[in-house]
Amino acid sequence: MELNNTEKKEICSFDKNIVRNILVAKPDKYKLLETISHRNREIINTGSSLSYSPLSFGEDIICLDFKKFNRILDFNKNEKTITVEAGITLIQFLNFTLKHNFWIPQLPGYPSITLGGAIATNAHGKSCSTHGTIRNSIKSILLFHKINGWMNLSEKENKEIFDLTIGGLGLTGTIVKITFNLTNIENTLFITKKKKIKSVEECNKVISNYNNSSYFYSWHKADNIKNFGEGIIFENIIDKKKIIDFKGFKDKNYKLKPFLFPVWNKLSIKLCNLLYLYLNRLSTEEKTESFLKVIFPFYSKESYFNFFGNNGFTESQLLISESKINDFMSEFKNIFKIHKPTITLFSLKKMSGEQSYLRFEDNKVCLTFDLIKNNSSNNFMNEIDNLCLKYQILPSIIKDSRIPKNIFDKTYRYANDFREKLNKFDKKRVYKSEVSKRLEL
Amino acid sequence: MSYLIIGASSGLGRALAEKFAKEKKNLIIVSRDERDLTALKADIEIKYNVKVEKIPLDFSSFNEINQKLLKEKMFQNLSGILFPVGFMHEKDNFDISEEDLKKLTFTNYLSIVHTINYARKCLNKQKLSIVGFGSVSGLIGRNLNMNYAAAKRSLESFFESMSFDEKLKDMNIQFYTLGYLDTNLAFGKDLILPKGSTQKLAKIVYQNINVNLKKTFYPYFWNIIAVFLKLLPFLFLIKLYKILIK
Ligand SMILES: Cc1cc2nc3c(=O)[nH]c(=O)nc-3n(C[C@H](O)[C@H](O)[C@H](O)COP(=O)(O)OP(=O)(O)OC[C@H]3O[C@@H](n4cnc5c(N)ncnc54)[C@H](O)[C@@H]3O)c2cc1C
């Protein structure tokens, strides 16, 4: 096949904030990956395009869709390793590994995300307080770079590029193959326990003592300053008693397509929050839940995103020191009172790891909230940016497509390190995206 | 016994390899780039627990085919040969280079015939299914991919001729004339008609693998379009085309 087809497409970031007309190429052979890369001046790798920020596309940049590279290349049960191509989705991956009672515990929360995308964003899962980010499960990577060619990356080989690539937003080249160290998982059923809490501050106190548990996160009502933060802590524990045979997951291809008009507004959110809170209070304190429900909480609940309509939303994810949460929250509530943004979701979990380069990772508390996009939320978020500087908070550039360069530069201490090393590795700076251009990476 | 799939590394070939392996059939897969074959072999063997042999070769070269593929013992142990192989060229018109013209004709027609003729000679009591894939581009003459279309039309004629073979009792002959499929060949093309699914086609091919004689279009709606195209006089079609272009 000597043809080099590209498709013109309108693409938008998952939060619907940035829309571009782009060209996509979808190689299905190794030679084609090389040819397309060599023919185009500026490239960006694309997985499932499920990033909230425009990480996998950009104006006048060819998108290299990697989904056809989704094969399992090696599986060593004794050494507990697996090698896969980077376009494999989480559900395809799990359908194989769970049959053998293995997985990697740092899986982000939607099954059609690709492992290439997860690595390039150094993704984390629900158990990030214990298991950290996906970086901890990676043994080695095979990278293809238009100028530097094929490279094996690991702690022992090309370590500097290995470190730049994990969480490197696809800017170091195409991650082609990945070898993971697998972790045992005894069952695909979880027991979910619930605990009521009155505020975010109380939640912080409670979760700081959850040292023996791997999977916990909280949900809070944040639609009103009165009772702000009232909510529930969920704790998931792998059920080691009622062991079930893993039968495989069906990829149901639920639609992530915005409604014609937004359903979320102050009233609908208030009602849903109330309903959710009371249903959870009424239901039993402990119940058994499936793997999909626990690990991919939005799977089959895509309406939550679709209800924002074409206007989209803003998601902010912040890493805050445990000791600063209370002060931060009190200022947060003050600016909430002033700007009155509509917060549709508010959640907390603990995270572990070491921050470096562009990685969203640290031994801190991870606070996530979604907002309906409008003037008041924009003003509110501008003030949150200032709080990030004041409290040395790390905002996620993967989730928040709005973060300005000056805030990024001041909050990501190692951003310049990343820039310098990337420019040394790739003097022509071939791999670029909307985000990398905005942040001048 | 195994199935030999020529052009297995992507598109329909890969879908066929996956389907046949899922049905626990051992495979011999052929394609140009060993890297693609290695990845496919590993994936299939790990997932479906079947045996896969890979033969990297350039299917446009009789030399390579003779040296690496045409092995009597291997052919005597085949249950079927599938040819989801195709080669297109961006500049497939009157100005095509000699080398590219050869490549096009060999890959899309001559090498397939050469392989089938060899397989026919090796028949050893087994029933052998031979599955070919044509293209709707070969229905009538055209101004795009003209040599590709000509080769595909020749191939169709060759498969039709095989139906008269006295050895037909030992062979199943199947030929699918394909419209656009969801493969890289059609990626990015503005098409009026919908693309067919390679996975669905692979399922159909598998279901029909033991049918003695089969000739159809895929996607099926091409069966109707083809009847009309054949009914209309060629000169009329040319005139219609010129009016539409204007
Ligand atoms: C509903 C939902 C829930 C989520 N939950 C979580 C969560 O719990 N934790 C978390 O950390 N994240 C989460 N995310 C974010 C998600 O994990 C990341 O945005 C991820 O990168 C998306 O993967 P993708 O396959 O869609 O990649 P894309 O969005 O297409 O690409 C993302 C980045 O990866 C790069 N990339 C993709 N493939 C390759 C490759 N082969 N080689 C090199 N670079 C590549 C791209 O260039 C881009 O920079 C969630 C997202 C959604 C939509």
Image (spheres, coloured by chain):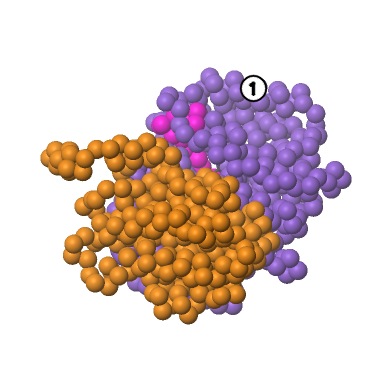
Q: Colour of chain A?
A: purple
Q: Quadrant of the N terminus of chain B?
A: bottom right
Q: Where is residue A388 drawn, in percent x and y?
A: 50, 48
Question: Would residue A429 be counted in the magenta stretch?
Answer: no
Q: Where is residue A401 drawn, in percent x and y?
A: 43, 45
Secondary structure at numbered mark 1:
helix
Q: Between A309 and A335, which is closer to the camera in this rendering?
A: A309
Q: Residue visible at 51% across and 70% down?
A: B121
State which quadrant residue B78 falls in.
bottom right
State which quadrant residue A441 falls in.
bottom left
Q: Residue visible at 41% across and 56% down?
A: B161
Q: Residue visible at 46% across and 63% down?
A: B7
Q: Residue visible at 24% across and 72% down?
A: B98
Whether residue B73 is visible: yes
Mark 1 sits on what residue?
A274
Considering only vertical position in the picture, is A90 above or below A142? above
First to last magenta residue range: A306-319
Answer left or right for B242 relative to A70.
Answer: left
Please identify the residue farthest to the front as the structure is shown. B166
